[in-house]
Amino acid sequence: MADERETIVIIGAGIIGVSTAYFTAKKLAEKYPVDQRPRLILLEQCEPGCSASGKSGGFLARHWSDGTDTEKLAQFSYDLHAKLAAELGGADKWGYRAVDTFCAEIDRIPVMPAKQHKSSHFRTEAESVVTSIEVIAPRSRRSSPAATTMEYSLPTTPNEENMQPNSTHASIAVPEIESVKVVEPGTVPWLRTNVLTKLRQVGDTANTAQVDPLKLTRALLAEAKARGLEIVKAKVIDVAETGYRPPLIEFTVDNCARGKATIDEEFKVVGPSSSAPASTSLAGNSPVGTQGGWGKPMTNKPYILQLDQGSDIPADKIVVACGAWVTSCLRWEAFRDVSASQIPIQGLRVHYLLAKPKYDLPAQAVFAEINGTVYSGEDAIEIYPRPDGSVFVCGEALDDPEMPPHNPFEPIYSKRATNRLKQIVNDVSPALSFDIIQYGLACHLPVHAKGIPVISKVPNTRGLYVAAGHGCWGILNGPATGLSVSELL
């Protein structure tokens, strides 16, 4: 007998998908007894946190998004991180701690930087006050009576006169805020003072913190699993919609008087009608005795997830939260009315390494800006000592919008970029002339063209949702996004 319980499927086990799973499982566990609880399934083709969610720095800032579209989202999520850490033992489980944060201006180092990711986007004053998330909105009915595609809820293209630059949030940029103050070079004792031209404190323990994102992702996953979450390791091949029949291209065969069969010159495009004429079809015959029709298994669920292994999964609601791979959904039948322009998200390749310093470093995060090079602003080198004794260093965001490999475990790093990163950190700190723990690493950050994550129900659907495009702030905004999507569900 088919399972009559409501089935919710989340695709992607990064921080967004896992946070959604955690808060949804928590709500369902509080609301339903075990035997009546809706099924909650998390699909992941590799491993939890195998891409950006397990390979990013884990820097958190409450105030660095102030004045931007994501201000409220960032503030709420920063506070939610602290709450989760207090409730679930985050200090021990995923290295949550408050940190002092600094921006170090350093004399030019003789390196040959890689081509950086630099893209300028502009918006009008009206666009600067939109909501903190991108909401997918249906196209106006005035455009076409049959229009089923979607477009942005943001205002139209700005005029040339009132243009203001807008970062795509590809990487973290040190903000220009009133609380920034110049401090003595010795405040960060592990930096080389002979190359340091200015040191500014841009955050303190009241408004900046850090986590180990891989440990955070897996800890929340364990909590969700304890509340009934099912985890399935498989790749989604398609999401079919039950009851949907695509239009058919049909032609008729005319038996001429000469006894030769010829194809009629006029092809016919007919809609999905149960009374379609009995003629030869390029699509083949519809199977008999299946409720879904056209080869779809019998189910009362609106969607069927077709997987590369194991059994297909009928579902009532589906959340697509697979980061840089989110546009994969555009190939799925149920997402046929969604266009690439509505979820303009691509992977930005960022390099990083993990190292062991010569001695323990204090709870300080440093953004190293190197004068006279491209390593400044949003391309500063980020250095995060962690409570476990390792140091996370990232940078070298290469401007090569290649499609990420389907397997995040495939090597994608640039050897030249990694060597440059290692050279820079060796030059800025005597403590960072270290033995490398992990070297030659890279991941793809899911970057939205407008710098605003998509957190939305797909309009005109029975239960499809998208949550992706958080860029460098995915770890910060992950918990709030997961909570928001759980409320939508």
Image (spheres, rainbow, N blue to C red):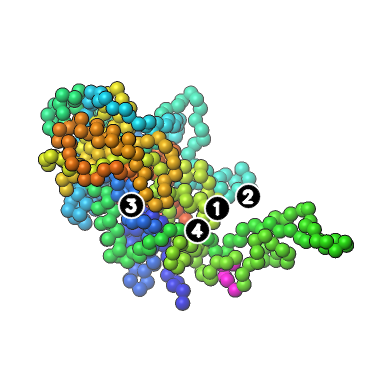
- For the residue marked with disc 2, what is the amino acid? Ala
3D distance between C-alphas at marks 1 and 3: 28 Å
Closer to the N terminus: mark 1 or mark 3? 3
Contact, mark 1 vs mark 4 (Cβ under 8 Å): no
Which residue is depicted at the point 16% across and 48% down?
Answer: 388
- For the residue marked with disc 3, what is the amino acid? Cys
3D distance between C-alphas at marks 3 and 2: 41 Å
Find residue 146 and name its label: 2
Relative to 415, residue 161 above or below: above
3D distance between C-alphas at marks 1 and 4: 11 Å
Q: Is residue 95 magenta?
A: no
Find residue 27 and name its label: none
**Residue 347: % across, % down:** 40, 43
Closer to the N terminus: mark 2 or mark 4? 2
Find residue 238 and name its label: 4
3D distance between C-alphas at marks 2 and 4: 24 Å
* Secondary structure mostly taken by the magenta-highlighted segment of the chain: loop
Q: Label 1 belongs to which residue?
A: 336
**Residue 360: % across, % down:** 12, 41
